[in-house]
Structure formats: C-alpha cells, structure tokens
C-alpha cells in the first residue's frame, strides 16, 4: 500500500492514473507528478553516464549543483 505522497504505478495503471485516482487537489497532484518525473529522469541520466554527475548534469542542461540538489531530494 502506497504511503501518502508516494506515487507508484502498477503495470495496468500509469502514474497519472494513480494520481487521478487519489482525488488530490491540483497543486498536490502536480507536485507529486513533478517529483516522480524528476526522480525517474535523474535515475536514467545517471545510468546513461555511468553515475558521472558532471556529465549527467551537462547533458541535462542544468548546473551540477542543481542536479545534485534534485538528486539528493529524491534519494
């Protein structure tokens, strides 16, 4: 069972459907969607660059420090 504030998709439902099913206020649903997107994005770009934060940040078009802040927020 998901913890409040945690978005988990099942094979039959995507993240957006899961958020809609929770009947959250728009600002909270948007916040959760952005959090999930950032977490997945950071994971994928780090994997692509074998964990090299500098290269991942450059490829993402953001400063290394900002990349690290986003990464820390989603650990």
Image (tube, rainbow, N blue to C red):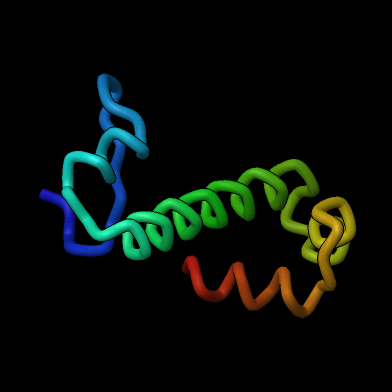
Measuring from the top left, give residue 28's x and y in whole percent: 32, 63
Q: Residue at horizontal 17%, vertical 49%?
A: 23
Measuring from the top left, give residue 30's x and y in whole percent: 41, 56
Measuring from the top left, give residue 69's x and y in whole percent: 64, 77
Q: Is residue 30 above or below residue 10?
A: below
Q: How many marks?
A: 0
Q: Is residue 63 left or right of residue 51?
A: right
- In the rendered image, the residue lying farthest to the left is 1
Q: Is residue 47 left or right of residue 74?
A: right
- In the rendered image, the residue lying farthest to the top is 12
Q: Is residue 47 above or below residue 75?
A: above
Q: Residue at horizontal 56%, vertical 56%?
A: 38
Q: Is residue 42 left or right of residue 1?
A: right
Q: Nearer the viewer, residue 18 or 54?
A: 18
Q: Is residue 68 left or right of residue 54?
A: left
Q: Looking at the rendering, which quadrant does residue 71 occupy?
A: bottom right
Q: Residue at horizontal 87%, vertical 57%?
A: 55
Q: Residue at horizontal 47%, vertical 68%?
A: 75
Measuring from the top left, give residue 66's x and y in whole percent: 73, 75
Q: Looking at the rendering, which quadrant does residue 57 occupy?
A: bottom right
């Amino acid at each position: 069972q998901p913890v409040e504030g945690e978005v988990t998709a099942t094979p039959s439902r995507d993240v957006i459907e899961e958020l809609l099913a929770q009947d959250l206020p728009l600002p909270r649903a948007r916040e959760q969607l952005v959090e999930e997107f950032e977490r997945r994005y950071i994971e994928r770009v780090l994997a692509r660059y074998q964990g090299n934060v500098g290269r991942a940040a450059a490829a993402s078009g953001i400063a290394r420090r900002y990349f690290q802040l986003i990464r820390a927020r989603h650990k």
